Amino acid sequence: MRFCKKLYLSPSIQDKRRQIIWKLRTGRPQPTIYLIALAGNEDLFEIYHSGMLKQRYYKKKENAPYIVGIAQGYSGAVDLVSEMLTDVWRETNSYDVRAYFKTAARLKQPNNE
């Protein structure tokens, strides 16, 4: 599982970031947590329930989603996607979310190539 350095979080889980990521990595159940990932096809984002990542398919490195947001509840995930798209448009005047998050990762890690 890979996480973006500029990870978007719902306001209700801001203080629980480390605990939620730890639970995701160790396979602990989190019934109200939804993950927003970059889409594997031409779509912009995909929304996953946290339980989906327990499947064997997602444990392979090449299938692991690139998580860019964590939300509480599905409606929270939809609101967070809306916020993310607004930020992408404001910063780049386009909806190229892949380039936006790649740039955000480079800003946090200057030696990342």
Image: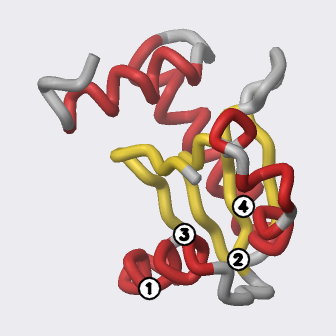
First in sequence: mark 4 or mark 3? 3
Q: Secondary structure at mark 1?
A: helix
First in sequence: mark 1 or mark 2? 1
92 or 53: nearer the viewer? 53
25 or 80: nearer the viewer? 25
- Left or right placement of residue 62 versus residue 42 in this view: left
Which residue matches tag 2?
Answer: 33
The amino acid type of the residue labelled 3 equals: Ser
Which label sits in the foreground, 4 or 1? 1
First in sequence: mark 3 or mark 1? 3
Task: Give how far apart the Cα atoms at labels 2 and 3 are.
Answer: 10 Å
Residue plotted at (69% across, 60% down): 35
The amino acid type of the residue labelled 1 equals: Gln
The amino acid type of the residue labelled 4 equals: Ala
Which residue matches tag 4?
Answer: 77
Check disc 3: other Cα within 10 Å, few if <14, some if 14-19, many if 20+: some
